[in-house]
Amino acid sequence: MNTAGKQVRTQDVIAFDDPPVAKALFGNTRWAWIWLILRLYAGYEWLSAGVGKVQSPVWVGGQAGVAITGFVKGALAKTAGWWGWTAGCCRPWARLGGQATFSIRVALWERHQKRRVWARIE
């Protein structure tokens, strides 16, 4: 769209203040220690889950794909009502195979992402 020579009208910007609770929790440095502890705990849980997957034979070993197949089958068994469309998306994938490749990708991708996060922290 060419606006040369035309007067372009811009809308006024309306700014909203954050809610008081959000200001208190996120805008104040007094809460930094609590957020640090929560972030370190979440990072530890995330890292330990990824290491467990990389070391488990049902994710990357000789039985690769068993864990993700069980997860998908359990999810398909629980779908009903509005969530039925998700079953329609997952059933062909479950029938085609490739769960072993997918589970290895999941485990290694999580490990890769954790390394990137920890590299930024250090």
Image (cartoon, rainbow, N blue to C red):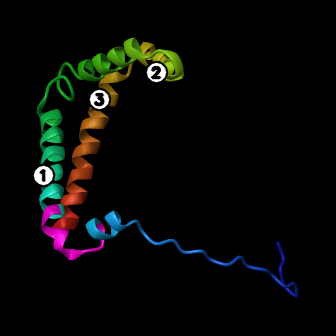
Q: Which mark is residue 89?
A: none
User: Considering only order in the chain, which callout, 3 or 2, is on the residue closer to the N terminus?
Assistant: 2
Kindly state the secondary structure of the residue where label 3 is placed.
helix
Q: Identity of the amino acid at label 1?
A: Tyr
Q: Vertically, is 9 above or below 23?
A: below
Q: Which mark is residue 41?
A: 1
Q: Identity of the amino acid at label 3?
A: Ser
Looking at the rendered image, the disc whose residue lies closer to the viewer, 2 or 1, is 1
Tell me which residue sits at (12%, 59%) in the image.
37
Picture coordinates of residue 45, whole percent (x, y):
14, 44
Q: Identity of the amino acid at label 2?
A: Cys
**Name of the residue lying farthest toward the bottom:** 5
Q: Vertically, is 9 above or below 20?
A: below
Instruction: Name the main secondary structure of what is drawn in magenta.
Output: helix
Q: Report which residue position mark 3 lands on.
A: 103
Distance of mark 3 from mark 1, alpha carbons? 25 Å
Looking at the rendered image, the disc whose residue lies closer to the viewer, 2 or 3, is 2
Q: Report which residue position mark 2 lands on.
A: 90
Kindly state the secondary structure of the residue where label 1 is placed.
helix
Picture coordinates of residue 108, whole percent (x, y):
25, 41
Picture coordinates of residue 120, whole percent (x, y):
22, 66
Q: Vertically, is 51 above or below 68?
A: below
Q: Foreground residue, 39 or 15?
A: 15
Report whether 75 appears left or right of 86.
left
